[in-house]
Image (tube, rainbow, N blue to C red):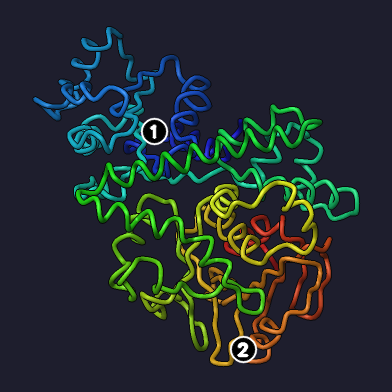
Amino acid sequence: MRRNRLKDLIAWKNQAQRMPLLLDGARQVGKSYLLEKLFGDQYFQQVIKLDFLANPSLCQVFADSKNPADILTQIQIVLGVDIDPGTDLIIFDEIGECQNALDSLKFFQEQRPEMFICASGSNLGLLTSFPVGKVDELHLYPMSFEEFIIAHGNTHLTEAFQTCVRNDTVHAKLWSLLLDYYFVGGMPKPVHTWVNGDKSKINALSMRVRKVQRSLINGYIRDFGKYVSLKSTALHIERVFNNIPMQLMKEINGSVNRYKFSKVIPKKNGYRDLEGPIEYLVKTRLVSKNYIIQGKPRSPLKTQIMESRFKLFLHDVGLLHCLADVGYQEIQLQNFEFKGYIAENFVQNEVLSLGLNQTYSWHSQHHAELEFIFTRPDGEIIPVEVKSGQRTQAKSLKSYIERYNPKQSYKFTANIGGFRDSNLQTLPIYYAANYINRLIYNELE
């Protein structure tokens, strides 16, 4: 299955001098497959892979020396391969399991910048020692909606999506796929199961997808106990993780409410009580924060945040529905009047897949909630409202426009879109990433 991150890896390869590349992301989002199969097998003569999770004894290769020449000799001896630095790709998989291998990246950058060294990891945010400034970093998220469309093999529909075509035929196809995506999500294993399954037996297929999703969730929960020292801490992380659907479903006027810290963990009621479990989930990229800005937004938005005021989203909408026990038929029956929380979580994940590290929303003292605000390169703040259904009344967005008179504003809904009223444009929600991407990089007028 195609991944859009491939183009970034190709650009890295084409540099004359390069730093080792570190690919970070939650478990099972497809890091190893992207590096080894989509990138390595297609663009290199040979791929040499060291998987430190599957084979911990490989850490011995780095035990005696961090000198690249010594390490390459050791790899050739242990794996019985010949390495050509000019044509071969070396992958350090799950590098977080081997601190010495992670430390060696600094020396590869300084002594062998012509070599093709890639590393991947799922727990890198938890590490206390990291080669800052010595590696190129990329983040891989679950498959975006565009990648989900591509996986279905309809090149004409893919082209229509990429060029933001708006007509009834395209809208019907894309909306149907979006509802499927809300159930399946973007984790590669469920997507593969869905795309290659028998759609004429939809109930059996959806059950198979759900089984794969539950297996992924169980794997995450097992990891909670692996990377923390206290059992009680692991249980707290699990409680926060399982509580995310309930938090998101507490909507106010169709918008996700700020995260509430009470009643998640017994006898824990404040931000400082839950900060550790939440930050664990953020660092392992299983959740992401959307910080709530109060008052008039100004650039840079980061200067206006309060640590305890945020919304918390799950990294995959399919796993979110699995945690909430919402089935395929229930999603389909909601059709155009879908729950607001999933629309917000969808847009949040689509934006992160573009490479934006942090998102923000806006809240007024009069309870107006605006799901997203973005900063253009010139510092202009652009408000974005997300409506889950076809009803497009946007009181919060109207309030924002009356207060601050932005040059542009956008509203994403279940409609076919294309409506423009002064400086407000209404668009279908499945095109959110396309337009926000152009907005961020100053390509929208």
Residue found 65% across the figure and 62% down from its top = 343
Where's residue 422, x and y in %? Answer: 79, 81
Residue most extreme to the left? 64
Q: Secondary structure at mark 1?
A: loop
Distance from label 2 to label 1 (Cα)? 47 Å
163 or 209, nearer to the observer: 209
Q: Which residue is mark 1?
A: 16
Label annotation for residue 404? 2
Quarter of the rendering occupied by the N terminus:
top right
Decide which of tag 2 and tag 1 comes sooner along the chain.
1
Quarter of the rendering occupied by the C terminus:
bottom right
Residue found 18% across the figure and 16% down from its top = 74
Residue found 49% across the figure and 75% down from its top = 258
Q: Is residue 171 above or below residue 255?
A: above
User: Which amino acid, mark 2?
Assistant: Tyr
Q: Is residue 21 above or below residue 33?
A: below
381 or 99, nearer to the observer: 99
Mark in the foreground, 2 or 1: 2
In the visual, does 282 lie left or right of 247?
left
User: Which amino acid, mark 1?
Assistant: Ala
Whether residue 162 is visible, yes or no, is no
Q: Secondary structure at mark 2?
A: helix
Where's residue 331, x and y in %? Answer: 72, 53
Whether residue 229 is visible, yes or no, is yes
Residue most extreme to the front? 266
Q: Residues within 10 Å of mark 2 (few under 14, many from 20)?
A: few
In the visual, does 187 lie left or right of 242?
right
314 or 152, nearer to the observer: 314
Q: Residues within 10 Å of mark 1 (few under 14, many from 20)?
A: few
In the visual, does 98 lie left or right of 39?
left
